[in-house]
Amino acid sequence: MFIGVDDTDSDKGLCTTYLAAVLMKRLEPLGNIRSPPKLIRLNPCARFKTRGNAAVAFELETDRPEEARETALQTVVEFSDLSGENTNPGLVAADKRTPEMKEFYQRAVKEILEICEAKEILDEHGVWYRGFKKGRGLIGALAAIGADLSDHTYELIAYRHKKNWGTPRKIDWDTVWDADRQTYPGTWDTVDSHNRRVVFAPHSSDPVLFGIRGDDIASIKRAFDIIRSEPVERRVLYLTNQGTDAHIIQGEIAGAIDDQSYRLTGRVIEAPRAIDGGHTFFSISDGDCSMACAAFEPTKNFRYIINKLAPGDLVEVYGAVRDGTLNIEKMNILELAELAVLEAPICPSCKRRMESAGKNQGYRCRRCKTKAQDRERKVQPRDLEDGFYEVPPCARRHLSKQLIRMKVPGAHPSR
């Protein structure tokens, strides 16, 4: 049986991954949990979502399916914050994964889906499910079951004892930096070196103590052993679509719509400009259509790169479209435009710069009396290289693929 759950937490606390961790432990007497469970991030543009828009699914081998479903139902009721305005839990228990479920996942990570679309598939295949309140979590629960990951990463999540929920986390930050130094790039997005931030631990009152992400399980476990913290109640290693760009659609500017994420190519058509709040904007065009692009204040030092762009630069931008503007997650500079200025010519005799001889009268050297008609074209050096750039870890979306994982030439990874 495949069990999926979503939309159980709220801004006040609790956590869908913690609920799943408790549920897997409770189901152990009823069968065998096939690990690792899947932690699936869905469309980051979803307007109705809990904190990280994550759903969880796992596979259970059991000959007591009715008891397993009842245990899952009781656990969802116990560990869901049903008081949350946007908390609408969904629980699904399917006997098999179908092509329709796999396709549903592909859509859920890229599009905005309706609850009725999930229910239609569930009813068509006779799948057992329960929805609470509006039941919006059925979308994520079904998508997590259907997730077929051509690319994947891992996250080891450590959870707090209940008595510590809502209190400041006790973590030895020096050991976190040490763990990053010893395990990067097998682990990543533990710290943000440029902005001197630790980014692997939340600040909310939920049960999560911290999460270590990476590609290499041995490195992840080594980092966990290095880090010193308050006692851990339990820990779970999840297989996940984080850091895979699963949400990105290769598209054209003309077809880009709100609430979806794209990879678009175009030339910069205006110099970047900053507005109050530290947000930076510019626009690109593919010759037929244009699109506004933004690097918002939370992207920190990434804006320094954006500010060096100039009209004529050919770029490939990745990010989500909201209100007609693409919020950049990373950028590939394909071609830098040549910047040139026109200056008064140099006197061939004394090598000094000439002065204007008057309107429409060209230029002259007062010392040598030499004359010239036209200004000289001087190419300006660019304090910018082509290649890939990305937002820092403190601003990274869960799904956005890190440059350290892309292994592309000319990459400029942000630590």
Image: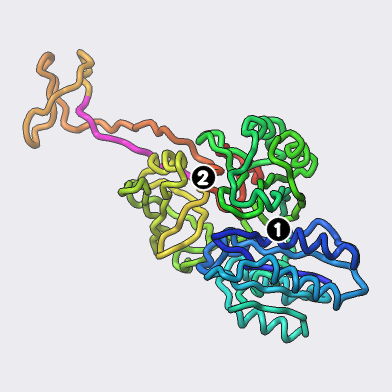
Which label sits in the foreground, 1 or 2? 1
Determine if the magenta segment contains residue 380.
Answer: no
Identify the magenta region.
335-345
Q: Position of residue 365 (x, y in %)?
A: 13, 19
The circle on residue 18 is 1
Q: Position of residue 364 (x, y in %)?
A: 12, 23
Q: How many marks?
A: 2
On screen, residue 20 versus residue 349, left or right, reads: right
Label 1, secondary structure: give it.
helix
x 54%, y 37%: residue? 197
Hey, what amino acid is under mark 1?
Tyr
Q: Farthest left residue?
A: 358
Determine if the magenta segment contains residue 340.
Answer: yes
Q: Tag 2 or tag 1, which sits nearer the N-term?
A: 1
Hey, what amino acid is under mark 2?
Val
The circle on residue 391 is 2
Q: Position of residue 72 (x, y in %)?
A: 77, 71
Figure quadrant of the N terminus: bottom right
Label 2, secondary structure: give it.
loop
Q: Position of residue 135 (x, y in %)?
A: 62, 77
x 72%, y 54%: residue? 152
CB-based contact (under 8 Å), mark 1 and mark 2: no
